[in-house]
Image (cartoon, rainbow, N blue to C red):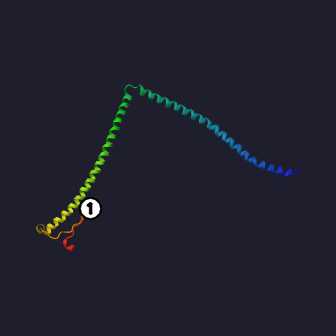
Amino acid sequence: MESLDPLLRTAESTLRQFDPLLRKTGDALDTFRDGIGDALPLISQLADSLKVTAESADGALKRIDGLIAESQGGIKSDLEKLKVALDQLKDTLASADRFLTHTDKSVDARMAELSVVLENLKVATTYAKAAFKTLGERPNRLIFGGKLNELPSEREILKTKKPVPLKPEAARR
């Protein structure tokens, strides 16, 4: 019996420690039950309200469908005209897209051609500048000939974005 005595005291102590925990658990359950009790009527009212709203929306959609289907003129004819106009607009936009694509390709080709023409013009004007400079300095060269001026190469002319200066003969000697 003596060995049971400490065991019983320990069990009693442990059970006493559970007492506040059980009281708090009971209080929490009471609070939860009261909260659920307050919330359930509100949830029920919300569900009823949503049901009425859904039925009202469904009825409105049915009335709109009926108006569109039964209408001899008015809305139905306007909607059909709008559909035709939108189809025409779609076709027009598709045609404009094809036109712009074709025009874009054409402009790209013309820009490439213009670039070649401008490069050729750059070379030609540089050579013409050299010829007129020589003619201005020594017109007799035209008749009697003489030492030719060194001209920049076509590659040098095309490589630079600025006009190519001609070096005077004295600087070359």
**Residue under the point 46% across and 28% down:** 63
Q: Which residue is mark 1?
A: 158
Q: Secondary structure at mark 1?
A: helix
**Residue under the point 19% across and 73% down:** 170
Q: Quadrant of the C terminus?
A: bottom left
Residue reaching furthest bottom?
173
Q: Amino acid at mark 1?
A: Leu
Question: Going by the image, does 40 lie left or right of 139?
Answer: right
Q: Position of residue 82 (x, y in %)?
A: 36, 33
Question: Going by the image, does 2 lie left or right of 134?
Answer: right
Query: So how many labels did they put on this image?
Result: 1
**Residue 112 position (above or below residue 171):** above
Q: Position of residue 92 (x, y in %)?
A: 32, 39
Q: Position of residue 67 (x, y in %)?
A: 42, 27
Q: Residues within 10 Å of mark 1 (few under 14, many from 20)?
A: some
Residues 59 and 92: in front is 92
Residues 81 and 49: in front is 81
Residues 126 and 67: in front is 126
Quadrant of res 98 = top left
